[in-house]
Image (tube, helix red, strand yellow):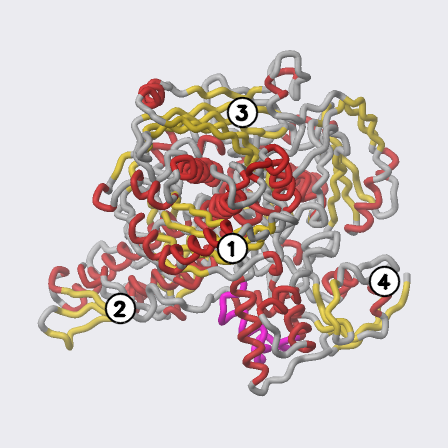
């Protein structure tokens, strides 16, 4: 077992974990952040995307021990409480009907947040390429792309992107 | 009652944002895999790595692994585990192989479950799998579906004496008579490749036992049906079993099942009296969640030289895989009445052979039989148009059922209640810029542009809301076609809608709230919807086949009518007038001619809860249930047009423009309808260009992960132009027709027609799906070699 200290959504905690434990299972099973989900076992689908020290990563391809000393932001930390103000990307996904079953949505939102942090004014093609690592089976991506465009416009008007 | 039928401008038909989104965008979700309970054990299944073999299983070593509580094989459960269910006897001579949930002495596809490890954690359970010892005595694998029918071929199931499940041969007289009059007879062979549904949430099951009853949480589309099947298979009484489908991350047909894993999870929880969880990996999912499509179609059409369609003959071979799931054998028959599509003809014949192979079983996948049929019909219409030198839309217009001819009984016996193919096609042509794109296509052909433009047409219809029950009975389907709804009016005037239709992304909460708000005049925000839990919703037939709104929504509307009728009695009693003197609008009863005399429906509800002063003999409640059995299926339709740029030097195809004009009847929420169309188009494009479940000659699935099985990403797809026409269904109280499968059905032929159209000048008449760059490049290269005089795009003719 290994001892790690990870700040998750603003809360720092130390845990004993198996060295092979994946970050996504650490977040879900140890830290109870079940918004982040697993959709594949080959790092293709992106459902488990979180921000690790401000950069989007697929948390199924990171070991929990590799996150020792890091700052992780999950979907549940993006809007810090249920009643708190939504992040513009979350708001835009709802506004544009950018989700149906919602399983890919947390990962898709986190990837989009990272995309907009790095490129506040992406073209449609840049959006499509920016979220290429996140698969959705319901929406055909049309409304997801619109949601990211909408969020970009909102954030350009004064809201600030979130970093972990 | 006339005023209650009027649409509310505020809610019905509006693109309201979905009520279900708040928890999904914040991660406060209820996926089955989120459930953790004290003492919960984790299951992992050992699966066959070999397509066909006799097996001997030894679990002793695995049972002593750290963290392992138990290991079970078929021998440990014996008769207790029963056999997997199938739900449709399609033919009196149909062969039905027995399929135990865990293989007893023989495995028949890669991925078939053999044993289960029960351990304290998911990691420990997976660790112990490798310690289970299985002797595999390999048998010949049957992989090619046509070879499987030949004499002397090895058998998938020795006991059946054949690999054929059934052979349906319909009389061909009408087709032969039509063919005798034809100037043109065209025959094509199409392959509907095997597809893997790949809902984003892999399957998960949690079973919580108490003293003598069970709660099963499952990522299923069919909690109600599942409960019945589990009861039939395991003998656990329905009344002792609650099945809950919490948030479910997509289905597309793949979660219409009573799976081996659900059955075994129930038995393990029963035996150990502890909660258990099973959560599958994507790789497991790809191997074992039933696959879709996998048919070979040989279609012949007969026509006159002016384009008048005379007849169609369909010979179909369906690869069922190794066993029967609920609708495995019936899926090809869902298409039997759809090959004639929107067209009039004098002759029709449908023949179908269904075959067992050593592959994962097939079953319903988005559209189930109808995409296959629509593809065949729409590809043939484009082929005929090319052969005759006609515009493909003109050819369709010449043959389709005219707006004024509805209701129309098709040659295969379906009664289409309403439709307006003219309107949808005209609108789509306009949005597409059809004539301009045809002109550009001509320019590119004439200039031998290496990037050719193809235009694909799909004027489709489909059948939604599988019903009525009586008709299903005549077809020997072991299911009804009804749906149940219940409306509860609470003491404080809020509404609970209980529906037997179980959502997994379709937005029932929002759409049902809109329906009820419109009917009862209660605020949208005051309406809640309970679904997917057999405890709150005791009966239902769940969600598949685009039945939710047309069947489930109709039940909701009918239940609302009963609530209003009860409330009317209360209002008449309280306001001291005849019921006939009351008008009901916007949630209030008023006495005709004296608008001051008024009672809200919520006040009626409160009066019945107090029950101090309600009509003599009246049950003190407005709550009402209705079980709705439709009188017919519904037939949405539309015209999809696709322009594709095909690089004839690399084979790379890029969708340049996609226009979808759908007619799904009356629309409750256009935002949801559009979303369904978008997603359907993407899934259909997936079949046309990207997706294929492949087995090697030994029966190994070589596309077993998202690395090899390409579901399209955002970068692979364009944005779509969508619009709709609205021709109400005349066969249900809403006028809706269903939308979930339309995009998926329409887009595959539109895209393939476009790609073939782009390379047709080379003499190419088909590209097998998926039309990958490699396949397109190969087709162009071979065509150039075979027909040097067609060596340019300009030089060829169809």
Q: Which residue, as the protein is rendered here, is positioned at the far left? A: B593
Asked whether the beta carbons under mark 1 and mark 3 sit within 8 Å of each other, the answer is no
Q: Is residue B89 above or below residue B543?
A: above
The quadrant of the rendering that contains the N terminus of chain B is bottom left
- Which numbered marker is on residue B679? 1
Q: Residues within 10 Å of mark 1 (few under 14, many from 20)?
A: many
Q: Give me the C-alpha separation between circle 2 and circle 1.
A: 36 Å
* Marks 3 and 2, how far apart at CA: 54 Å
Labels 1, 4: front one: 1
Viewer-side label of 2, 1: 1
User: Which residue is under mark 3?
Assistant: B354
Marked residue nearer the N-terminal end (3 or 2): 3
Alpha-carbon neighbours of circle 2 within 10 Å: few (<14), some, or many (≥20)? Answer: some
**Residue assigned mark 2:** B587
Q: What range of the chain is rendered magenta?
A: A78-99
Query: CB of mark 1 within 8 Å of CB of mark 4?
Result: no
- The residue where tag 4 is placed is A17
Same chain for the residues under marks 1 and 3 in the image? yes
Badge 2: chain ID? B
Q: CA distance from mark 2 to mark 4?
A: 58 Å
Asked whether, in this view, residue B439 is left or right of residue B323, the answer is left
């Amino acid at each position: 077992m290994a001892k790690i200290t990870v700040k998750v959504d603003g809360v720092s905690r130390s845990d004993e974990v198996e060295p092979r434990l994946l970050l996504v299972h650490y977040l879900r099973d140890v830290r109870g952040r079940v918004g982040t989900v697993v959709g594949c076992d080959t790092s293709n689908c992106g459902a488990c995307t979180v921000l690790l020290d401000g950069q989007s990563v697929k948390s199924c391809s990171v070991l929990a021990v590799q996150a020792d000393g890091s700052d992780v932001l999950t979907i549940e930390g993006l809007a810090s409480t249920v009643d708190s103000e939504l992040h513009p990307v979350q708001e835009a996904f709802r506004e544009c009907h950018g989700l149906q079953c919602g399983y890919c949505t947390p990962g898709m939102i986190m990837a989009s947040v990272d995309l907009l942090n790095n490129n506040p004014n992406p073209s449609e093609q840049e959006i499509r390429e920016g979220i290429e690592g996140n698969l959705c089976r319901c929406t055909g991506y049309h409304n997801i792309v619109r949601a990211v465009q909408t969020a970009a416009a909102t954030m350009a008007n004064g809201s600030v992107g979130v970093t972990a | 009652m006339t005023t209650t039928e009027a649409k509310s401008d505020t809610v019905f038909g509006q693109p309201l944002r979905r009520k279900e989104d708040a928890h999904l965008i914040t991660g406060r979700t209820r996926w089955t895999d989120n459930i953790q309970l004290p003492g919960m054990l984790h299951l992992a299944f050992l699966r066959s790595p070999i397509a066909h073999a006799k097996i001997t299983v030894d679990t002793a070593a695995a049972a002593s692994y750290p963290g392992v509580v138990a290991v079970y094989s078929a021998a440990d459960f014996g008769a207790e585990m029963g056999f997997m269910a199938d739900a449709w006897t399609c033919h009196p001579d149909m062969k039905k192989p027995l399929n135990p949930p865990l293989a007893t002495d023989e495995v028949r596809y890669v991925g078939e479950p053999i044993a289960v490890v029960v351990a304290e954690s998911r990691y420990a359970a997976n660790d112990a799998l490798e310690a289970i010892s299985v002797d595999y005595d390999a048998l010949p694998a049957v992989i090619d579906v046509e070879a499987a029918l030949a004499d002397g071929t090895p058998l998938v199931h020795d006991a059946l004496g054949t690999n054929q499940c059934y052979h349906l041969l319909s009389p061909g007289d009408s087709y032969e008579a039509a063919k005798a009059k034809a100037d043109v007879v065209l025959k094509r062979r199409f392959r509907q490749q095997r597809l893997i549904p790949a809902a984003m949430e892999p399957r998960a099951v949690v079973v919580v036992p108490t003293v003598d009853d069970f709660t099963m949480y499952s990522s299923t589309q069919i909690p109600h049906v599942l409960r019945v099947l589990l009861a039939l298979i395991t003998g656990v009484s329905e009344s002792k079993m609650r099945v809950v489908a919490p948030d479910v991350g997509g289905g597309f047909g793949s979660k219409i099942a009573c799976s081996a894993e659900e059955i075994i999870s129930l038995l393990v929880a029963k035996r150990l009296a502890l909660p258990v969880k099973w959560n599958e990996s994507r790789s497991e999912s790809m191997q074992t969640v039933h696959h879709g499509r996998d048919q070979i179609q040989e279609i012949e059409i007969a026509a006159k030289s002016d384009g008048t369609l005379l007849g169609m003959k369909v010979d179909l071979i369906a690869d069922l895989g190794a066993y029967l799931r609920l609708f495995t054998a019936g899926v090809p028959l869902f298409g039997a009445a759809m090959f004639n599509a929107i067209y009039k003809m004098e002759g029709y014949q449908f023949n179908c052979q269904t075959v067992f192979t050593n592959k994962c079983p097939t079953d319903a996948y988005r559209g189930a039989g109808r995409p296959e049929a629509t593809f065949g019909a729409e590809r043939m219409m484009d082929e005929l148009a090319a052969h005759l030198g006609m515009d493909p839309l003109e050819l369709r217009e010449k043959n389709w059922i005219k707006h004024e001819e509805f209701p129309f009984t098709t040659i295969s016996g379906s009664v289409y209640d309403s439709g307006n193919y003219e309107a949808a096609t005209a609108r789509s042509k306009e949005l597409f810029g059809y004539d301009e794109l045809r002109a550009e296509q001509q320019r590119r052909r004439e200039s031998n542009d290496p990037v050719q433009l193809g235009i694909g047409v799909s004027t489709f219809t489909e059948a939604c809301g599988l019903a009525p029950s009586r008709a299903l009975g005549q077809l020997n389907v072991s299911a009804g076609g009804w749906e149940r709804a219940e409306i509860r009016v609470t003491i404080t005037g809020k509404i609970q809608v209980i529906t037997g239709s179980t959502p997994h992304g379709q937005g029932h909460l929002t759409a049902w709230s809109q329906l009820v708000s419109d009917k009862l005049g209660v605020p949208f925000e005051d309406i809640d919807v309970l679904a997917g839990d057999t405890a709150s919703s005791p009966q239902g037939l769940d969600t598949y086949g685009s039945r939710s709104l047309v069947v489930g929504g109709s039940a909701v509307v009918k239940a609302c009518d009963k609530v209003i009728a009860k409330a009317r009695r209360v209002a008449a009693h309280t306001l001291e007038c005849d019921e006939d003197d009351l008008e009901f609008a916007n949630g209030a009863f008023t006495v005709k001619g004296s608008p001051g005399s008024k009672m809200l429906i919520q006040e009626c509800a409160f009066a019945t809860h107090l029950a101090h002063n309600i009509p003599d003999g009246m049950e003190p409640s407005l709550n009402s249930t209705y079980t709705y059995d439709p009188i017919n299926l519904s037939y949405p339709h539309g015209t999809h047009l696709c322009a594709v740029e095909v690089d004839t030097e690399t084979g790379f195809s890029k969708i340049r423009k996609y226009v979808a004009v759908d007619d799904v009847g009356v629309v409750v929420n256009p935002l949801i309808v559009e979303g369904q169309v978008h997603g359907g188009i993407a899934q259909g494009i997936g079949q046309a260009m990207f997706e294929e479940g492949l087995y090697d000659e030994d029966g190994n699935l070589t596309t077993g992960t998202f690395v090899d099985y390409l579901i399209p990403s955002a970068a692979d797809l364009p944005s779509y132009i969508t619009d709709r026409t609205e021709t109400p269904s005349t066969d249900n109280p809403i006028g809706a027709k269903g939308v979930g499968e339309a995009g998926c059905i329409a887009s595959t032929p539109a895209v393939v027609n476009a790609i073939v159209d782009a390379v047709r000048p080379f003499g190419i008449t088909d590209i097998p799906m998926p039309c990958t760059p490699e396949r397109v490049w190969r087709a162009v290269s071979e065509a150039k070699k075979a027909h040097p005089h067609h060596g340019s795009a300009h030089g060829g003719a169809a």
